[in-house]
Amino acid sequence: MFQLKHTPFHERTAKLSLPQNWRRWAGHVVVGSYDLHVEREYWAIRDAVALIDVSPLMKYMLEGPDAARLLDKLTPRDIGKMAVGQVGYTGWCDDEGKLLDDGTISRLGEQTFRLTSAEPSLRWLSMNAVGMDVTITEVTEKMGALSLQGPKARTVLNLVCKKSLDKLKYFRVMENTLAGRKVTISRTGYTGDLGYEIWMESADALHVWDALMEAGHDYGIVPCGILAMDMARVEAGLFMIDVDYTAANHAWIEGQKSSPLEMGLDWAVHLDKPGYFVGRRALEREQRAGCAWKLMGFEVDWEGMEPLFAQVGLPPQIPAMAVRGSLPVMHDGKQVGYASTSTWSPVLKKYIALVHLQRPHYEPGTRLTIEITVEHKRLHAPGKVVKLPFYEPEWKKK
Amino acid sequence: MTSSNQYDAIVIGAGHNGLIAAAYLARAGKKVAVLERRDVVGGAAVTAEPFPGYRFSQFSYVVSLLRPEIIRDLELPRHGLKILPLPSTVTPMDNGDYLAAWDDHDLTRQELYRHSPRDAEASDEYGRVMARAAKAIKPILGLVPPDPSSLSLRDMMRMLKVGQYAKSLSEKELYQIAKLLTMSAADLLNDWFEFDPLKGTKSASGIIGTFLGPSSPGTAYVLLHHYMGEIDGAFRAWGFCKNGNGGVSAAIASSAHALGVEIRTNAPVQQVIVKGGRAAGVALANGDELQAKVVISAADPKRSFLQFVEEKHLPGEFVQQIRNFRVRGSSGKVNIALSELPDFSCLPGEGPLHRGAISISPSMEYIERAYDEAKYGQFAKNPYIDMIIPSMIDRDMAPPGHHVMSCFVQYAPYDIEGGWDDAKREAFGETVISTIERYAPNIRRAIVGKQVITPKDIEAIAGITGGNIFHGELLLHQLFFLRPAPQWADFRTPLPGYYFGASGAHPGGGVMGAAGKLAAMEVLKDWK
């Protein structure tokens, strides 16, 4: 009663987590890591197949003649251009053009959409739907959601699904039957690898979990917690609310807010679409003036970092997991930005970070330094600004 | 007269504000005496033991707004200040269910969602809007309020300071503040929410200590006033003081003492001595005279200006304004010693609810109706009650296995029809017990002793005219540069050498200490 919520998979996940490492996610407890070595879970994402419980994502069904019109008003994306069966990632803003949240929109039918968000959005949706013929239903607790990620994900799914996944393109969604249960499957994820998200009734959750674990057994399936996913999502250049940006309605001061253009979502901001959408005028102004800040990638030079540790007789010490903490980024001894998440990338063998940089320092190739701590001393390691993502395997979209 | 009766400054009243003012003056090297009418220090922040072994915060019972800089400056932690968490509010409902709000965003949301998904989300947003508004307005509380009609350089500089600060706020924030300053709590909450127990519980903090109902304009601001405690939440400025609120006073008194302040109890002040048009000391009721360069009153405005100072020393207009200052007591308190915990039907057995606040506030209408009765001179038959069980937070408050429960009750008008007497006090106490009994049926048999405090008792014991817990209601026309009177909100008074630094001054009540500190600072500025 006075506990945080469990997901529909809790019965399974609780037994599988060896370190009993729990994390909070949107009012739920979810497994942080299953293995004593997070890297084993991480490598399942990159090399085999990983099963991740993503049920805490907020989920809303939008249905009715004005469903598309509502989403078109709410988000900078051109919803009119989305075909049935298509999924679109988008951020959405307040009227000052500052990001409130981000998530995916699945067009399940001409007048039926499913929206995922990180934060509760019922109020925002309803407020903007006044006068529209659309019903908004929150289905977060009614549905379980699993993310099956990794190069073997399709192979495993094909073993248990009635319809083949072979034709399902990147960011498309389909109805399917998985081990006899009705599911929808979208080719989406938060890892930047080949991957799918499977949406089901909560009642079917354990059955689906078991079927996937069994089918995946010979392909190296590993249940994967959110710590490993956090490493993969940084490599994929995917940011996280309240870690890499502060939702505009959570911000204490103006300076904490970010626009989708600053966050590199230019490709999902369709200023050429007709009509008003929330934040349009502010985003048009920003588009004209150019962004004061940009989210970029940063790769630390190993050769530049090594001597800093060598001075005290150590090899470089890099956190083995993603670190959600701000690190100053400098140019000529002056701070020009900060990292919001940094991690060791096992697949790239690099120390990488998502960084927020002030103009003009965000051009790819710019040489900057990032703060590192060497035996309790704050030092600066050199590195360079790169485009996101850091890592994109050829099979991601194939 | 001996030199031992000569001081730089004399403070009238050893409430928390008086002690704080004295401590700050002593810290600046002044020779200071605090004169207290009673045999204990603390004023309305005192711990009493009416039944052996059962200790109560007799009047004020939580610490919410004690200024963090006062805690630091006076080194209160070193002098024993411990503020323990009070992490939840549970509102029992008439249908046997309950509404719980926790000091945890996810749990609170989950709980509210059960009743209203819409309100669960609105509550998040509301909390942020209120916190931002409180953050925006909070620095103003720390400033000496400027008089906007004054052309004096001092006031203009202060105006500029507020203006500069206001400029740093976004337009949206300014509009929010303007709305909050003028609305009723009911209108504000109806804008946001639909679930009655939620609105009832939230509206309660808009009417505490005022003689208004949730539908009266201006109550939204009081709601915000209470939100300020939340900003410093991380510093644990909100909670239950170890040893009750007497613990706050003890820590401040200890700090003041260490700084060299002389605290005299059983020393009621008769009058402020005026010589050559200036305050020059005080005469005690026993005839002793004490001399001082300045006198600071930490009593309520009525006592400070209508009792301690002869009318001939003050402008008639000022006296008139102080006479009109509204100090209508509206609340009472019932302190109950218990042999067992109250067992709430909505959440049977001992549970987390016993470690937090329990609020009898099923709806705004319930509270508004309670006000209606008070408006016409009766105590509420179905009152709003804010309960805490201090012995669940600090085990030293009651004998092992036993408990003490503090019930703040509104409305109980000071001016009850026919006047307060023992029979009415008893009936008031009985109303409170039977109200609680509806939700916790074992309460009656668990009672070991009960202390019923009416506004009249607050006046008689703590010396607060009208028994108003804030020394004067937090009404818009009694705030900022209008508190306690126009032109005299800067802690000075029309009588040179006489200063005023208590809850009746800016920024108002609560165990906040700002008025005491600010008054001391103004005294030091004027020091020649």
Image: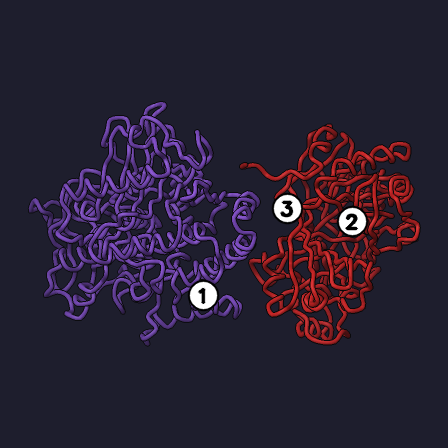
Chain colours: A red, B purple
Question: CA–CA distance between discs 1 and 2?
Answer: 41 Å
Q: Quadrant of residue A156?
A: top right
Same chain for mark 3 and mark 1? The answer is no
Q: Which residue is mark 1?
A: B177
- Badge 1 crowding class, 10 Å Cα cut-off, few under 14, some 14 to 19, many 20 or more, is many
| Front position in the image: B101 or A307 | B101
Question: CA–CA distance between discs 3 and 1?
Answer: 30 Å
Residue A81 in the image, given as x and y percentages of width and height: 81, 68
* Secondary structure at numbered mark 2: loop
Q: Amino acid at mark 1?
A: Ile
Residue at 81% of width from left, 61% of height from top?
Answer: A84
Question: CA–CA distance between discs 2 and 3?
Answer: 16 Å
Residue A190 marker? 2
User: Does the residue at mark 3 contact the one at mark 1 (Cβ under 8 Å)?
Assistant: no
Q: Amino acid at mark 3?
A: Ala
Q: Quadrant of residue B488?
A: bottom left
- Badge 3 crowding class, 10 Å Cα cut-off, few under 14, some 14 to 19, many 20 or more, is some
Q: Nearer the viewer, mark 3 or mark 1?
A: 3
Chain under disc 2: A
Residue A26 marker? 3
Horizontal placement of B79 versus A139: left or right? Answer: left
- Badge 2 crowding class, 10 Å Cα cut-off, few under 14, some 14 to 19, many 20 or more, is many
Q: Amino acid at mark 2?
A: Tyr
| Front position in the image: A295 or B73 | A295
Horizontal placement of B318 versus B98: left or right? Answer: left
Residue A328 in the image, given as x and y percentages of width and height: 69, 52
| Front position in the image: B226 or B138 | B226
Same chain for mark 2 and mark 3? The answer is yes
Residue farthest left in this picture: B287
Q: Is residue B371 above or below residue B452?
A: below
Chain under disc 3: A
